[in-house]
């Protein structure tokens, strides 16, 4: 050995001084593909922001309830009756006997037990039913995230199977499946969801707590077509690769070909589309809950929390109790944006050519 | 930690991953790269560089281009790729200089350095100079030249032909439009009509039969050989002094290749320019070149006139390359082959790069990088087999080695 | 068009007999017309390959070499004609049986980058089909794969690595190992060298020769590099625009190329000697489109010897000396 390995003197990635004599070909090492992706992901500021947002939402929704339960012992549907004297203002307009219009204005004090303002015990106050808003936000986030993940997993599963079959077998299989996809894709999503949810709500034999499962099924049905398209397109492209030809010449079973050679190679696209889809599902779920067609009362949901401020039920909450609806709105924005940022970051990380 | 890695790599039934960089190494490389690149970019982006700074003198006024100890490095995520690592050669006026070597030897990067087209910011010319002499006898150092000055030379005085013409022709414009544009860009007193005339003249020159039709077609409507002709016509538009042809026939069939080679030779005579001809095909080089430069892992290992290289190759790599071509072997013989493969020029050792593939390797070869040995005014090779100047402490080794 | 069916006598010597093979790719998939426009990628080709020999197939790009290989293996369905492998007419073998037969005929691909599944480790790529076809008992599986890898010049520690970690030459070795592991009789090599460096090419040629000597493989070696084909093959076929122009014993074809196209092709190969000035026949023009090939002799648009008859009648592919067939009117005139 001519050169002794002095620590710290040479960069520690050139560990080849005694190695190179046998293997000049392997004189350098590459970065593993996984880490390459990670590296590119973290190069973008936006994906880091997105990740931070999503981590925050997750901690808030899944760890939050435990902390609340531990410190204050609050439950999702625990009613707090906090008595306070509140100003009650009533105004009206009426026409006097003299034909002129009068404004009626009255201000009095009343005793209210709900709608408490933020306080040390209830950081965001309580709502119209006396539930603690902060606690409800956490449970609401929990259900939103769970629903969106389940829906996305189901969607992807369905999409992979149907898209995979269409792409692999082609011919009439492809025709049939893709026409179904077309039909689903041209249905107006929201109106259909509204109709379906309203129908479910009106069927009395379905217990309220089961409604949420139907909701997930509908959301899945509306969403799988995108995944199926991606998988099919990807498979059509991969099928032309020579390694698929090679798999054919070695006589590998079709199922193995699909699930060992084709599907794994569509994974990056699927992960991206799933991440981007998560935000969408959260929005749908919130919309339905806002219209009280989603997660049933008294379970908490971000959508129904915003619905409290619905101006058609009076301006009061919208105007005087922002603590009841602004946080829920913010959380929806954070979650949806976060997932989009991560999805975009992942797409650039998996396929740097897509950038710009 | 280094110890642990070594352990992993040598494991026979090892889990993969041993070939991967660890996170710490990766960070370290990344940090060093950022620092180095910043420094170079600062120098590159200076404004108002005075002309004195990049005016120099040619070593020999008969040359168009002189590469002098050129180093072009890429600061990548896995380490510094020394793509061109001390390359010096000349391109004389009116001659064809062939650059051969296997892929990854730095042929393309050498030519891109001359055009100032090395992919910044990861790619940087770190040392050396490239001298270019223009028609008026003025001599510039391309490595120090500001970008806007370079624009005037690139495409006009020095033109380039690539392996895949499709990538350098814009698919949405007609061939003719693209050609006219080049002329309008580089020649101030040209008009639309004169440009068109010149384009058609050039298309004629490269032997295209139906000029009008080709002038009005889109690149994808042409065959590979036709596209390459168009590329050559395009390169000729501004009467270049030097044409860089980077594997111009690699993507073509032999019969079309024969056409294109003949055309290039013709064209060179007509415009009295020089050609830097890059290829990995020894046969093509033998046919085309006057001078040959053989590259290996970013360095020149042998250079000389075409006869010297083909009739008396000196370097074991050159000899090996010639012998591993299947043509002209003895029936039933195994083909000669050089073992191993071309190393990727990262973390190169300071001994002969060919050491682990060389049949004639000696002890001294793994201690020093061999200097160039001059055989005559043109021919030289970097190999200890021919080195007279023996380092005192290596004397015995050398004799041992020769005894084998 | 009436096709004279060739004699179907197959001796046991011939591992592969190809009779009047045709493969037309329809240009649009949904035509109802009876005679849709199609690319005549392979147009009436016949040849036989003897056991343990190598047949070289040369021709310019797009002339249908790959298509010949793929239709022989029934990766694409034949349009017309017969492929008889080891005495069995492949077109008549049902799909399920065909899958069982697959290991006997293998293929090595041109592009070492797209021919290996990027998400499978090397051991798995080589061994996948071995497992599927139970080539070796389970207990011996791993050592078998390692042995095949060693035979193909791959180090055992590559077993768990992924294709992206390898250079082109090593990938091509993996590709060869995948084919060899199945114990085939017949291997189609579709330009296995064209993506490789010169020094690596000779390694791979040697490897393929060694394997042939050890195991007695039969090769159909497709290439556009004539010097390689000259080195490796016993018989050689020259294709142009989907048809065979000249075929025969390697030595005969190289020493005495009869077809004008073969002559031009041979003379176009650059020689590594600056002092040898080739008497080169430089062909004019480009290869015509296979959608609409010239009438009569397909080569006539570029042939320096073209005669009036060449445009009218297609020349017959005839044997002019033993083991040397040519399709050209220059020789059919009495
Ligand atoms: N799947 C396909 N569909 C339609 N046309 C095809 C298809 N495959 C090949 N062709 C056409 O058939 C002809 C022969 O192609 P083939 O790939 O067999 O040529 P080749 O001789 O292997 O060329 P190369 O040297 O470029 O590999 C070409 O004109 C090609 O465009
Ligand atoms: N843009 C780039 N970024 C990083 N490395 C590069 C880049 N371009 C070339 N290289 C490296 O430089 C070396 C020489 O490349 P090149 O000159 O293209 O080789 P060739 O001799 O085949 O033309 C190779 O190892 C290659 O990987
Ligand atoms: S210096 Fe030594 S190892 Fe290098 S080529 Fe010459 S003999 Fe071979
Ligand atoms: S048949 Fe006629 S055109 Fe064809 S190769 Fe012979 S001479 Fe040439
Ligand atoms: Mg190159
Ligand atoms: Mg092909």
Image: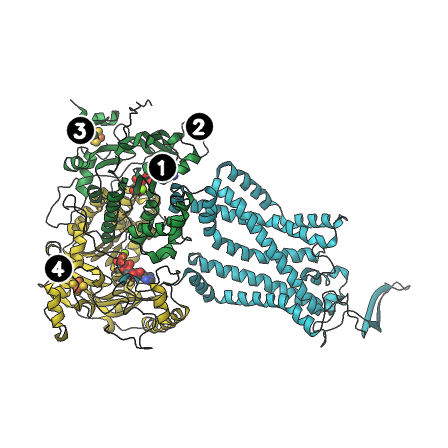
| Mark 1 chain | C
Secondary structure under tag 1 reads loop
Residue C277's tag is none
For marks 2 and 1, the one nearer the N-term is: 2
Beta carbon of the mark 3 residue lies under 8 A of ligand 4: no
The 10 Å Cα crowd at callout 2, few under 14, some 14 to 19, many 20 or more, is: few
Give the labeled residue for mark 3. C322
Give the labeled residue for mark 1. C73
Q: Nearer the viewer, residue A84 or A214?
A: A214
Q: CA distance from mark 2 to mark 1?
A: 29 Å
Residue B158 place in picture, x, y as percent: 24, 59
The quarter of the image holding the N terminus of chain C is top left
For marks 2 and 3, the one nearer the N-term is: 2
Give the labeled residue for mark 4. B314
The 10 Å Cα crowd at callout 4, few under 14, some 14 to 19, many 20 or more, is: many
Residue B195 place in picture, x, y as percent: 28, 51
* Shade representing chain A: cyan
Task: Report the chain shown in green.
Answer: C
Q: In front: mark 2 or mark 4?
A: 4
Vertical position of residue B84 compared to residue A152: above or below? below
Residues flagged by tags 3 and 4 on a common chain:
no
Q: CA distance from mark 2 to mark 3?
A: 44 Å
Q: In front: mark 2 or mark 3?
A: 3
């Amino acid at each position: 050995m001519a050169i002794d390995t002095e620590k710290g003197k040479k960069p520690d990635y050139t560990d080849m001084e005694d190695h190179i004599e046998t293997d000049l070909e392997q004189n350098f090492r590459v970065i593993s593909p996984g880490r390459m992706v990670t590296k590119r992901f973290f190069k973008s500021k936006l994906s880091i922001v997105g990740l931070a947002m999503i981590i925050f939402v997750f901690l808030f929704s899944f760890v939050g309830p435990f902390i609340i339960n531990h410190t204050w012992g609050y439950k999702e549907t625990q009613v707090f009756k906090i008595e306070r004297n509140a100003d009650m203002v009533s105004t009206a307009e009426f026409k006097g006997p003299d034909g002129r219009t009068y404004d009626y204005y009255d201000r009095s004090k009343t005793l209210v037990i709900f709608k408490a303002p933020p306080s040390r015990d209830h950081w965001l106050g309580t709502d119209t039913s006396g539930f603690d808003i902060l606690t409800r936000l956490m449970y609401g986030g929990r259900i939103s995230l769970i629903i969106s993940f389940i829906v996305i997993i189901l969607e992807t599963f369905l999409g992979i199977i149907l898209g995979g079959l269409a792409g692999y077998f082609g011919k009439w299989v492809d025709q049939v499946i893709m026409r179904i996809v077309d039909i689903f894709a041209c249905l107006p999503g929201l109106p259909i969801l509204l109709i379906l949810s309203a129908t479910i709500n009106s069927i009395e034999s379905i217990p309220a707590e089961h409604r949420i499962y139907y909701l997930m099924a509908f959301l899945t049905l509306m969403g799988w077509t995108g995944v199926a398209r991606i998988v099919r397109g990807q498979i059509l492209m991969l099928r032309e690769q020579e390694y698929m030809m090679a798999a054919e010449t070695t006589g590998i079973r079709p199922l193995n070909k699909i699930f060992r050679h084709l599907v794994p190679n569509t994974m990056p696209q699927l992960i991206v589309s799933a991440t981007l889809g998560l935000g969408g599902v959260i929005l749908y779920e919130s919309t339905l809950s806002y219209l009280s067609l989603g997660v049933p009362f008294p379970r908490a949901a971000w959508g129904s929390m915003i619905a409290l401020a619905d101006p058609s039920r009076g301006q009061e909450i919208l105007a005087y109790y922002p603590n009841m609806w602004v946080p829920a709105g913010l959380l929806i924005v954070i979650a949806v944006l976060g997932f989009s940022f991560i999805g975009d970051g992942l797409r650039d990380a998996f396929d740097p050519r897509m950038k710009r | 930690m280094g110890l642990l890695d070594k352990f992993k790599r040598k494991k026979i039934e090892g889990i993969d991953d041993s070939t991967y960089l660890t996170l710490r190494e990766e960070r370290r490389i990344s940090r060093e790269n950022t620092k180095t690149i910043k420094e170079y970019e600062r120098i590159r982006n200076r404004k108002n560089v005075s002309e004195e700074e990049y005016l120099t003198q040619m070593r020999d006024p008969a040359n168009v281009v002189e590469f002098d100890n050129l180093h072009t490095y890429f600061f990548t995520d896995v380490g510094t790729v020394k793509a061109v690592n001390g390359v010096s050669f000349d391109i004389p006026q009116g001659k064809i200089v062939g650059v051969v070597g296997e892929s990854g030897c730095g042929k393309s990067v050498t030519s891109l350095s001359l055009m100032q087209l090395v992919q910044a910011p990861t790619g940087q010319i770190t040392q050396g100079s490239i001298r270019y002499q223009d028609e008026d006898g003025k001599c510039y150092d391309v490595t120090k030249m500001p970008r806007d000055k370079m624009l005037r030379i690139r495409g006009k005085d020095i033109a380039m032909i690539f392996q895949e013409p499709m990538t350098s022709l814009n698919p949405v414009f007609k061939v003719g439009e693209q050609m006219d544009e080049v002329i309008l860009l580089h020649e101030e007193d040209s008009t639309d009509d004169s440009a068109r005339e010149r384009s058609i003249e050039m298309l004629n020159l490269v032997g295209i039969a139906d000029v009008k039709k080709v002038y009005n077609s889109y690149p994808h409507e042409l065959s590979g050989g036709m596209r390459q002709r168009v590329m050559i016509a395009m390169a000729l538009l501004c009467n270049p002094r030097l044409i860089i042809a980077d594997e111009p026939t690699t993507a073509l069939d032999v019969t079309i290749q024969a056409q294109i080679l003949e055309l290039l030779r013709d064209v060179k005579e007509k415009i009295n320019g020089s050609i830097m001809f890059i290829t990995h095909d020894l046969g093509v080089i033998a046919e085309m070149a006057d001078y040959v430069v053989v590259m290996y892992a970013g360095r020149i290992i042998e250079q000389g006139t075409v006869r010297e290289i083909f009739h008396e190759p000196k370097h074991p790599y050159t000899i090996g390359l010639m012998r591993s071509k299947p043509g002209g072997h003895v029936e039933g013989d195994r083909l000669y082959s050089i073992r191993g493969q071309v190393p990727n020029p990262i973390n190169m050792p300071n001994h002969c790069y060919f050491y682990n593939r060389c049949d004639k390797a000696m002890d001294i070869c793994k201690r020093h990088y061999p200097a160039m040995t001059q055989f005559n005014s043109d021919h030289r090779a970097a190999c200890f087999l021919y080195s007279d100047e023996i380092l005192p402490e290596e004397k015995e080794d050398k004799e041992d080695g020769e005894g084998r | 068009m009436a096709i004279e069916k060739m004699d179907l006598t197959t001796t046991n010597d011939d591992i592969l007999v190809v009779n009047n093979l045709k493969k037309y790719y329809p240009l649009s998939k949904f035509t109802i017309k009876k005679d849709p426009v199609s690319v005549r990628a392979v147009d009436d080709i016949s040849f036989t390959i003897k056991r343990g020999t190598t047949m070289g197939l040369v021709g310019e790009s797009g002339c249908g070499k790959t298509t010949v290989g793929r239709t022989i293996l029934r990766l694409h369905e034949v349009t017309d004609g017969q492929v008889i492998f080891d005495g069995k007419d492949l077109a008549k073998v049902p799909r399920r049986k065909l899958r069982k037969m697959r290991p006997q005929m293998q293929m090595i691909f041109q592009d070492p980058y797209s021919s290996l599944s990027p998400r499978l480790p090397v051991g798995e790529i080589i061994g996948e089909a071995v497992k599927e076809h139970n080539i070796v008992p389970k207990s011996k599986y791993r050592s078998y794969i390692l042995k095949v890898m060693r035979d193909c010049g791959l180090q055992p520690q590559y077993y768990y690595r992924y294709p992206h970690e390898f250079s082109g030459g090593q990938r091509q070795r993996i590709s060869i190992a995948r084919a060899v592991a199945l114990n085939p009789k017949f291997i189609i090599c579709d330009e296995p060298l064209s993506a490789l460096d010169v020094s690596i090419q000779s390694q791979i040629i040697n490897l393929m020769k060694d394997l042939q000597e050890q195991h007695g493989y039969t090769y159909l070696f497709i290439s556009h590099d004539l010097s390689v084909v000259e080195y490796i093959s016993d018989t050689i076929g020259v294709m142009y625009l989907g048809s065979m122009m000249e075929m025969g014993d390697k030595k005969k074809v190289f020493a005495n190329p009869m077809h004008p196209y073969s002559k031009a092709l041979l003379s176009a190969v650059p020689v590594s000697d600056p002092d040898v000035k080739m008497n080169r026949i430089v062909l004019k023009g480009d290869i015509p489109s296979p959608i609409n090939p010239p009438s009569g002799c397909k080569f006539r648009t570029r042939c320096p010897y073209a005669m009036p008859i060449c445009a009218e009648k297609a020349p017959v592919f005839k044997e002019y000396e033993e083991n040397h067939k040519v399709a050209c009117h220059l020789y059919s005139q009495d």
